[in-house]
Image (cartoon, rainbow, N blue to C red):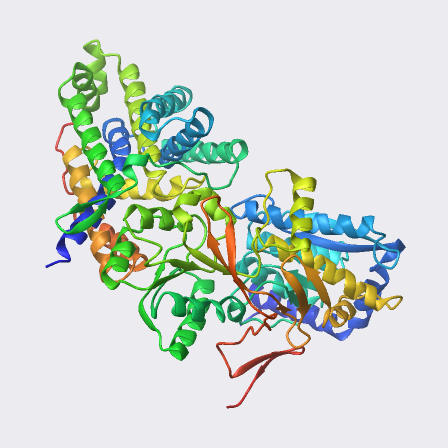
Amino acid sequence: MGVNRRQLLRGTAAVGAATAVGFPHIWIKNASLAYAAGGEIKVGILYSLTGTTAIIETSLNQATIMAIEEINEAGGINGMKIVPVIEDPASDPATFSQKARKLVVGDKCVSVFGSYTSASRKAVLPVFEKYDNLYWYPTLYEGRECSKNVIYTGAVPNQQQKEFVPWLVKNFGKKFYLIGSNYIYPKEENNVCKILLKQLGGEVVGEEYVPLGHSEFSAVINKFKATQPNVIFSTVVGDSVVALHRQYKAAGLDPAKMPMASLTTSEEEIAAMGGEFAVGHYTSAPYFMSHDSPENHKFVDAIKKRWGKDKTTNFVSEPAYFQVYLFKQAVEKLGKKELTPQAIREASWGQEYKAPEGLVKIDPENSHTYLWPKIGEAQADGQFKVIEQTEEWVKPLPYWAYPEQVCTPNGLVEKKT
Amino acid sequence: MSWIIPQISVGLSIASILLLVALGLAIIYGTMGVINLAHGEFVMLGAYAVWFLQSTLGLNLIACLPLVFVLVGLVGLLIEWLLIRHLYTRPLDTILATWGVGVILQQAIRLSAGAELRYVKMPDFLTSSIHIMGYEESAYRIFIFVLAVALLIITYLLIFHTEFGLRLRAVTQNRDIASCFGINAGRIYSLTFAYGAGLAGIAGALVSPLKSVAPDMGTNYVVDAFLVVVVGGVQSLIGTIASSYLIGQASGVLASLSNDTMAKAVVFLGVVVLIRLFPQGLFAVRIRRS
């Protein structure tokens, strides 16, 4: 039997990989020379400006650019300017991966700020791990990830739910109906919710996942009526949120008796559904546009001044903004030392910054971020009224629901119990 | 037995939306044999037309309906004139051509109106809910049901009790011979296509306050519409009604027994089996075609 084409290809690839592993110093040396060349710090911005998630990601792109401009106007970092390289991955995970490679290998960026969906983050992860670069991810997500090449500045389930679920049980009752879109985020969030409910003696009267983009909720609403939960715990996303809220109200259900408690409904979805359909429902997030703090007023005014009067901020654009400042502080701390992604990662651990939501800190243990969870009640004008805020920041625990696994600076560790 | 009324009403409300969306397609596909993959985009255009009329002129949804019918009908007329009429002898090519039209319409809306979800206001007097035999049903869903039935009756009268309908049926059976009798087949086709597009526009307008308005909303509706038309039998109005109800009720019952993800899969499976057994649909009309 001769060597066929596939085996030949595989063999050649293996030799290529072995060579790359065998002489890594050549690559790393070249790379470190290029970072911060000519008094410029190159960073990548990787948010979709076209495609399905373009709207929300455009707000992340704009918040990031604004932060960079502010830093540069104030004199840059240690006398160096930040130079953003902006790419449009077009809401497509494969394009994300391709553009990430371009930013890391071609442009030699020292860090990249990017991604909204978990799918796109998972797509770029191999690139950042292979080239040992650093990715800054601002979105709240399902946790259960521990890459040493990512700094996570969005909330994980324990931060969104640990205060929220007990508050719901106390104020409305113990019977929960869990409704979500059918993908990883809602399922992981509901795992956490079920554990919390068990501790509190609560009860799950229904758990259901609808297809992404689903817009016909009459059967679901009938189940609400039949099971009479005290709280509808919703992790439905995108345009389904709009359909669910509208059909809920049209069916004659009352938020005072059976409110929807969401982890995903933001000011943006409310604008699309109309404030009257959102009134009286609740969302848990570390940030709301209406949050009253000097830092937030400054942030909202700056966004409106820079990008237009009708622009809004949301619980993803705020981390997209403050994570650039955390990056700045990490680079500042390095001083005259050599600027590499690895050095920035280590310098970023423990950095604190007074963000619009409150004082945040990157956890040295797992590269996630200490945040300030809040509970907002939706108002008719499309804004949230912040009715509860944690008394202190909440530590991120990406493996909260999986006690046998622990995220450490060196990656995931399995604990024997 | 308390579950029966909620169950039937869920089935009816899903079915009436299906019927609304499928009616226009049934007419275009059934009489002209054009497989119009841009049908979902006509639905989407209807929804955007309402949004536009509401946000600029502040019109009530019900006042918008005739305008939407005319506007989307005109778009249909234009597309028929520019494209479809050149492809009547090549029915398979219409699939690709209309799909392309759909993509263009979708991107045109994305570029002009923006990609964000849009808000359409429900008429105030329909926001409440109504008690029927101990069950609370949304007034707006009842309104959709009533309008679906009304549009069905209008379509029926148009096809079977007007001279236009007579000509349409003649052209459907044999275009050449109908033309020999002095019927302007091209004009009949244009008007039929425009009427089908207009119906899709109304469907879009009616679902917009209950669901969401986005540039890619049409994709789901075109799939549903084809399911209904294929199951019901291509040329049968009765078939369209029956299969809307069948699919609506099946989705409702399955969603209640398990969940919507499951319901969708099982309904698709059922449709596959059905068209294996009844390739012509449940209500095949036996007519002679050239």
- The residue at 17%/51% (across/down) is B135
Q: Quadrant of residue B94?
A: top left
Q: Is residue A381 left or right of residue A23?
A: left
Q: Nearer the viewer, residue A388 or A398?
A: A388
What is the x, y in percent for residue B38? Answer: 38, 34
What is the x, y in percent for residue B20? Answer: 26, 36
- The residue at 51%/84% (across/down) is A404
What is the x, y in percent for residue B218? Answer: 39, 39
Which residue reaches farthest bottom?
A: A417
Q: Nearer the viewer, residue A24 or B45?
A: B45
Which residue reaches farthest top?
A: B182
Q: How many marks?
A: 0
Q: Does residue A290 lie above or below B241 as drawn?
A: below
Q: Is residue B88 visible?
A: no
What is the x, y in percent for residue A213? Answer: 40, 50
Q: Is residue A221 visible?
A: yes
- The residue at 50%/90% (across/down) is A417
Q: Quadrant of residue A373?
A: bottom right
Q: Nearer the viewer, residue B259 or B224?
A: B259
Q: Does residue A67 lie above or below B69 as drawn?
A: below
- The residue at 40%/73% (across/down) is A194
